[in-house]
Image (spheres, rainbow, N blue to C red):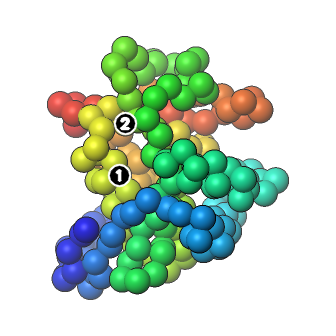
Amino acid sequence: MMPSGTMRFCDAGRFVHMRVTAMRIRTANNNDIPRIMEICGEARDIMRADGNMTQWTGGYPSEDVIRTDIDSSAGFVIEVGERIEGYFAFISGVEPTYLEIDGSGWIDDINPYCTIHRLASTKTSNGIARACFEWCWGRCSNLRIDTHEDNRIMRHCIESFGFSYCGVIHLRNGDPRLAYQKLHGRQ
């Protein structure tokens, strides 16, 4: 659980103070699916408003994708106070779309890793990506994540947390994604 109180953080190059409500990350369950789908819809709206018109199209992520995350114990929600404000999948093991990468390649392509997928938050929430990254980082010393080239907000969050750009991977449908990795001992 992240503490309540006042935090000082950098936002668009300037420091701001903000009242922070306690965040808690827990395993998602089937009762959370309606709220998770709302959050994914809001995240999609955020992408569109920022000019990212082609990521998360065609109903992705679907309820079936979220249910698969939950059934495999990989789906997590981030609660702010008593309300779910974020969602992500945290998956340990080989990600098939990461087997081939164009560019400089993975920093470490030998040791086991964990992957963050489907990170989403509401339009009014703050700090969800950082909370997700910190929680995952505390559980895995070799993290990978990918995002769409047009997802400027997520790219900023990923790079601000110290992930290194490694190249381009391709989804099963062939769409390219920018791939990142963060290792303990390499900040």
Residue at screen point 59% across, 71% down: 31
Which residue is identified by label 2? 143
In the rendered image, which quarter contains the C terminus?
top left
Q: Is residue 54 above or below residue 94?
A: below
Residue furthest right as drawn: 58
Amino acid at circle 1:
Phe
Say if mark 1 contacts mark 2, CB within 8 Å.
yes
**Residue 118 visible (yes or no):** no
Task: Pick the residue in front: 186 or 71.
Answer: 71
- Front in this rendered view, residue 144 or 8: 144
Residue at screen point 56% across, 53% down: 70
Is residue 132 rendered to the left or right of residue 7? right
Near mark 2 (Cα within 10 A), the count class, few <14, some 14-19 or many ≥20, is: many
The kind of secondary structure element at disc 2 is: strand
List x then y, in percent, for residue 64.
72, 53
Looking at the picture, which amino acid does disc 2 mark? Answer: Leu
Does 9 sit left or right of 132 as displayed? left
**Label 1 environment density (alpha carbons within 10 Å; few <14, some 14–19, many ≥20):** some
Q: Which label belongs to residue 160? A: none
Establish if 15 lies above or below 58.
Answer: below
Residue at 61% in and 27% down: 97
Residue located beneath label 1 in the image: 133
State the residue at coordinates (28%, 44%). Answer: 139
Q: What x and y, as percent, mark residue 42?
A: 63, 71
Left or right of 59 on screen, residue 159: left
Please state, as top left, top right, bottom left or bottom right, where the N terminus lies in the image.
Answer: bottom left
Residue 160 or 98: which is nearer the viewer?
Answer: 98
Helix, strand or loop at label 1? It is helix
Residue 108 in percent (x, y) is at: 35, 19
| Residue 168 image-quadrant placement | top right
* Residue 62 higher or lower than 143, as above or below: below
